[in-house]
Amino acid sequence: MWLTKDDFRIKAENFDLSNGLNILRIICGLFLFPHVAGKFAGGAVSAATAGFFAKAGFQPSEVWVVIAAASECAAGIALVLGICTRFAALGATALLLFAVYALQVVKGFGWTWNTGGYEYPVFWAITSFVVALEAWKVHLRQAKPRVNAMAASAAA
């Protein structure tokens, strides 16, 4: 099954910091929040951010800023809490790849972050993808015994 009730449960094991993947998942989620806050200045959409979105071709830019912020916030919360991790991490990966696309459209190719390049979003896209990949592996391992049990009971 793609999505189960268990995906929406906040479990104590999600916060076991002796598990490096939990640390990575939580950090991936936390690092999205400054981007949410940065899209707003004084409680409204930042003019600079709206201008950047417009230059990247996202029209109407203010609406896309709000969509991006809401998506980053939802993915961040889900990753921090360990809710629907495999989908939240894939969503974060997609958001970060859109950021890379926007940087390419607006500024052209540039790698290092301190010069406006996309080193930072590429790094976090890869990191989020690794979190998604590991979450899918866990999900498939947990689903396999259920499938085997159902097959055994059907054969009996």
Image (cartoon, grey):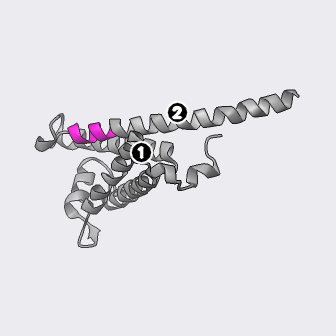
Q: Quadrant of residue 74?
A: bottom left
Q: Mark 2 sits on what residue?
A: 137
Q: What crowding class fits label 2: few (fewer than 14 Cα within 10 Å), some (14-19), or many (20 or more)?
A: few
Residue, far top? 155
Look at the picture and state if 141 lies above or below 88. Answer: above
Regarding mark 2 in the picture, which secondary structure is present there? helix
Q: Amino acid at mark 1?
A: Asn
Q: Where does the magenta region start and end?
A: 118-125
Residue, far bottom? 42
> Is residue 59 inside the magenta stretch?
no
The Cα–Cα distance between marks 1 and 2, rounded to whole angstroms, is 14 Å
> Is residue 121 inside the magenta stretch?
yes
Residue at 40 percent of width and 36 percent of height:
129
Q: Quadrant of the N terminus?
A: top right
Could you say where residue 37 lies in the image, as x and y percent from the top left? 28, 62
Residue at 34 percent of width and 38 percent of height:
127
Q: Amino acid at mark 2?
A: Lys
Could you say where residue 78 lies in the image, as x and y percent from the top left? 46, 54
Look at the picture and state if 30 lies above or below 45. Answer: above
Residue at 32 percent of width and 51 percent of height:
58
Q: What crowding class fits label 1: few (fewer than 14 Cα within 10 Å), some (14-19), or many (20 or more)?
A: many
**Image side of residue 21 versus residue 99, left or right:** right
Magenta span: helix, strand or loop, mainly?
helix
Q: Mark 1 sits on what residue?
A: 22
Q: Nearer the viewer, residue 106 or 133?
A: 133
